[in-house]
Image: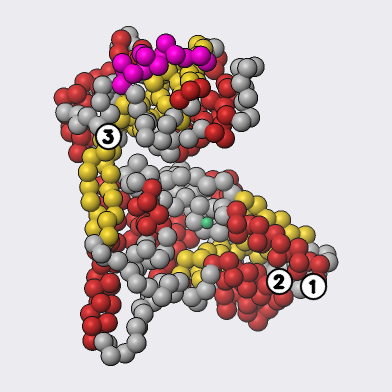
Amino acid sequence: MQGANWKEHEVLQRWSSVKLAQFPQCKNSEVTKIHIYDFDQTLFVSPLPNPVLYPPSTINHLRYPNSLANGGWFMNSDILEYSVLCRKGKDSGKWNLTVAELVSMSIADENTLCILLTGRSEAQFTRVIEEAMKQFQEDFELSRGFDAVCLKKEQMTTASYKTSLIVSLLDFYSNVNQISIYDDRERHCKMFREFLKNYAETVRPALIPSVVIVPAIFYYLPSDVEIELVHNMVADSNKIVQSINERKKHQKHQKKKSFNKSGVSNGNFNIFHLHNSAMHSSYALDVETTIRLQEKAIHFLKSFEDLDADAIPESLDWFLYPYIPISLHESVAKVSVNDIAELLHEDGNVRDANSLASNIQKGHQYHQRSWQIKDFVYVAHGNVIGFRVEPADTVSEVPASSYYTYLLLAGPKSISFYTSQEMHNLRNAFHHYFVIDSKDQEVFTTYLGVYHNFRLKSAR
Ligand SMILES: [Mg+2]
């Protein structure tokens, strides 16, 4: 360490959860900028519960810290650990490359403090985040890492923890006149903005704050891995609940006691079971594609002069998980391995179609398939909106059945699928239908799969 005494940066030692290998190269008084980066969904592309695996209510249970006794998805270190260890290298998709580049520049600037700040709890996640930071340094060939890696130390909300750290840094480094915070959560960003504006007004008029919302990138674990990890997580939660219940039995005479592991709830937790039933076999869309095609559909709506294109999108019930059905006759069809293999043969890129088909049928694997939007459809009386689509990567001719294949993006709540006959009938009723210009015939990716429906049921 040159030029600086450790006491000049004592605050970093106090806050950092990971032992610091080196202090900033400049003196306290020479620190003029602080750059703070959030971890999940900001620098690191962390996994989220895959929406094609569960109904929305189960996703809520998994995500919210008060449903499972062990805090659920974001309190589970196995899930984070798997996603840190299974993806290797700079281009493995685990880093948000835009943010990573900014971090590299912040680290390289001697007068900038570069801080990683996460609401993950120190007790549970220090080891895995330390490993992630080691990988980050290696992946981007950096000679130094962050000046501090800070995880939440106490049982408090992430927002108040982050704010208290920021105040502590600003107070300690009195020559800082620029602070930038990068985070994916809008609510937090809004809070940081207000708080920093206030700090500047009342304490340091020269301070220029900037708060940047980082658009989240979605990542899902391989589905068989995810289900196994979720199974374990639910089993672990049930064990905790059972031991709480045992304890309660023994404490009959005392007033209601509550057990509080996550620190957020005073916990009456349920025993849950994860039930599995195949939901549909289809070409499913991911969230990003869904949003892109929704925007495209709204764009096309606007070309109809007789429609109120501003009001319609509001009135539509957009499907959360739109899909192209495999069978145009029955959406819940349990497809055979042979049927899937036949579909795979349409795509010239598949080598071992039979074994892939068998894995897909078990719900263990997906196969990417590209489609192209051909015609635009809007049926006013049913509030149905979508596209007629055709496979984009078919080796031979487009199969005749594909001419009647539709991707519906919105429609009556109870329906996300029309049989080919229904589609045919609807077609006669199309008031707003047109063939899309070839330059607008966007290609999009879907995932051919048998989608299971893992539902958390309370055993209460
Ligand atoms: Mg985040």
Q: Nearer the viewer, residue 304 or 65?
A: 304
Q: Nearer the viewer, residue 439 or 62?
A: 62
* For marks 3 and 1 on the same chain, the one whose residue lies earlier in the sequence: 1
Q: Secondary structure at mark 1?
A: loop
Residue carrying label 3: 280
Counting from the top left corner in percent of width and height, residue 375 is at 47, 15
* Amino acid under disc 2: Leu
Label 2 – label 3 distance at C-alpha = 54 Å
> In the picture provided, is 62 more to the left or to the right than 20?
left
Counting from the top left corner in percent of width and height, residue 353 is at 21, 26
The structure residue drawn at horizontal position 36% and vertical position 31%, both measured from the top left corner, is 415
The structure residue drawn at horizontal position 35% and vertical position 83%, both measured from the top left corner, is 257
The part of the chain drawn in magenta is 419-432
Asked if labels 3 and 2 touch by Cβ distance under 8 angstroms, the answer is no
Asked if labels 2 and 1 touch by Cβ distance under 8 angstroms, the answer is yes
The quarter in which the C terminus is drawn is bottom left
Q: Secondary structure at mark 3?
A: strand
Label 3 – label 1 distance at C-alpha = 59 Å
Q: Nearer the viewer, residue 113 or 125?
A: 125
Q: Secondary structure at mark 2?
A: helix
The quarter in which the N terminus is drawn is bottom right
Residue carrying label 2: 170
The structure residue drawn at horizontal position 41% and vertical position 51%, both measured from the top left corner, is 48
Label 1 – label 2 distance at C-alpha = 10 Å
Q: Residues within 10 Å of mark 3 (few under 14, many from 20)?
A: many
Up-down relation of residue 220 to residue 318 (above or below): below
> In the picture provided, is 41 more to the left or to the right than 85?
right
